[in-house]
Image (cartoon, helix red, strand yellow):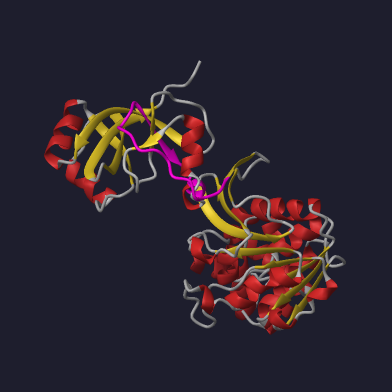
Amino acid sequence: MDLDQLAVLRTPEGSAALAAAGRVAGGDPLAAAAALRSAGIPGDLAAAALTQAELRRRAAGKFGAAAAGMFLTRPGLEQATRGVVAGRRAARLRAAGVTTLADLGCGLGADALAAARAGIRVYAVEADPLTAAMAAANAEAAGLADLVTVECGDATEFDVSRVDGAFCDPARRRAGTGRRVFDPNSYSPPWDFVTGLAARVPRTVVKVAPGLDHALIPAGAEAEWVSVGGDLVEAALWCGELAGVPRRATLLRERDDAVALLTGTGTQEAPVGPVRRFLYDPDPAVVRAHLVAELAADLDATLADPSIAYLYADEARPTPFARCLEITDVLPFSLKRLRALLRERRVGRVEIRKRGSALEPEKLRRDLRLSGEAAADLVLTRVAGDPTVLVCRPAPARG
């Protein structure tokens, strides 16, 4: 895809090609291309339309119905914020009084569009010409062009005195190769510019990778980790006037507005004790936010190993922040002994989860040679430093 191809896709001829591609995408790519050519669509246009149709099909999981009218690139789609996350962030910014927002490194415009839908005037900056053009096209397709202005340029040169809020999603892939960048100093814009925004704009949000080292969190900032449906999708730094608590875990669901929030200092340590009847496997947002101790206090739970984020309790309490399992057996890890136990109980299906174990779940599944109609959960972990397997079942529902 280049700027010329994008321009063609936005013509009536291109729109017709996109519509035709949408009807055949998702199947055999060769058959789809042949179908478009037989309909009289030139080869280059057919290829571009099919690429967009396939990307739109994948993007539906992030953007819902809005994906059908968006222009996308593969790297842009991978880094783009999910619609439910962008919408919640925009609502929080609007509630904090933000009326004009600089979106520095806007990518395909997912966050800019969400902010505009919340009634915020957005000035978006993107260094890549094609991506910037797509972001502008996406704003127009969404009917938000009057609230979103996109310019192609260097985000570090934008005059932030024009806005009362800033959002920055630094690129975490190398231009040209698409390879992930793990060192924040190699982000674009660079990390020192990103963290310096808070000193110039009193309401600043920075989207960062979920694996961000806590040592890099600026003093006074709120660090938030967000999961959607149990999948950890991003982290964000809320700076200046937007910072509410030191650490926050936010759990969202894709299909509704349900939100669960857990907050704390991120520095507390959970007490350590023996394995008890019930195991809680915390949501990854809770673990990454270092809020396991806060969850342990809510559940009257303890760790069995100070370095492993599994919690153990005598009661099964409802919580959105962890999955609860009932422990039936605690075994020092032994393949032979575990295989014999599962065979005796005719277990033919297992769900395997692990923390603190070097074992590969799929290899273990093969080595167990399961046979039977029953199911079980296996938890590979350490207890007081010793390799341990916990045989579990779903916790009984509370009546």
The spot of residue 315 in percent (x, y) is 42, 23
Q: Quadrant of residue 217?
A: bottom right
Q: Is residue 275 magenta?
A: yes
Q: Nearer the viewer, residue 228 or 189?
A: 189
Q: Is residue 25 magenta?
A: no
The secondary structure making up most of the magenta span is loop
Q: Residue furthest right?
A: 146
Q: Residue furthest left?
A: 336
What span is in magenta? 264-286
Q: Quadrant of residue 351?
A: top left
Answer left or right for 210 relative to 195.
left
Q: Quadrant of residue 44?
A: bottom right
The spot of residue 55 in percent (x, y) is 59, 64
The spot of residue 387 in percent (x, y) is 22, 44
Residue 131 in view, yes or no: yes
In which quadrant will I find the N terminus?
bottom right
Query: Is the residue 12 above or below the residue 44 in the image?
Result: above
Q: Nearer the viewer, residue 74 or 316?
A: 316
